Amino acid sequence: MRRQRRGQRTGLLHRYLDRGGETSVRGTGGELLKLVVEYVKQETLGPLRGLGRFVVFGTMGAVALAAGMLLLVLAFLRLLQDETGSTFTGHLSWLPYLIAAVVAVAAMVIAGWRVIRGAGLPDAGDGRSDFGYTPPSSTRAAKETT
């Protein structure tokens, strides 16, 4: 243990006061302000940049999926028009368009349902996820032993 000399002050604040008086306290306050500003930048701007990347890549993916689905629906429409022979001719020429529109709406409904429901959530109480993987848990082991 260090021995304190007579009249010598100890502690962090006293060291700053002994070095330069009030200017050192101001310097410490400036350092504190700089530290707080850097911390706020780190904790707000960093996550916002990450969020921006997430939004940009999500938007690009959504546009790519929409374009792909549009091309698939158009291909299905052309298939119905060309490969069905004379089935959809004359007064039934509108039917391939209706069938393609129903398929497109069904795909949108299924995609929306999956977004709302969540792809990785367990099904109705059976403990299995959508992909057939059953995560290990102590509750499952307890059920098996009883």
Image: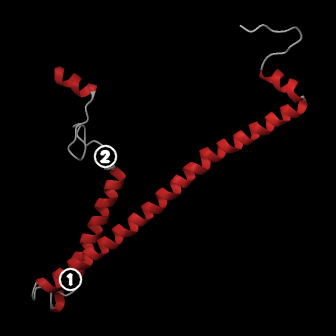
Q: Which mark is residue 2?
A: none
Report the amino acid beneath label 1.
Arg
Which residue occupies the foreground of this view, 83 or 86? 83
Residue at 76% over, 38% down: 31
Please state the horizontal and vertical placement of residue 41, each as a whole percent of the image. 65, 47
What separation in Å lies between label 2 and label 1 (alpha carbons)?
Answer: 35 Å
Please state the horizontal and vertical placement of residue 70, each as a whole percent of the image. 31, 75
**Which residue is denoted by mark 2 in the rendering?**
120
Which residue occupies the foreground of this view, 80 or 29? 29
In the image, 28: left or right of 141?
A: right
Which residue occupies the foreground of this view, 52 or 87? 52
**Which residue is denoted by mark 1 in the rendering?**
78
Residue at 87% over, 23% down: 18
Please state the horizontal and vertical placement of residue 91, each as a whole percent of the image. 17, 90
Task: Look at the picture and state if 134 lies above or below 53.
Answer: above
Residue 141 found in image quarter = top left
Residue at 88% over, 29% down: 20
Please state the horizontal and vertical placement of residue 30, each as a whole percent of the image. 79, 39
In the image, 25: left or right of 140?
A: right
Report the amino acid beneath label 2.
Gly
Tag 2: Cα neighbours inside 10 Å, few (<14), some, or many (≥20)? few
- Quadrant where the N terminus sits is top right
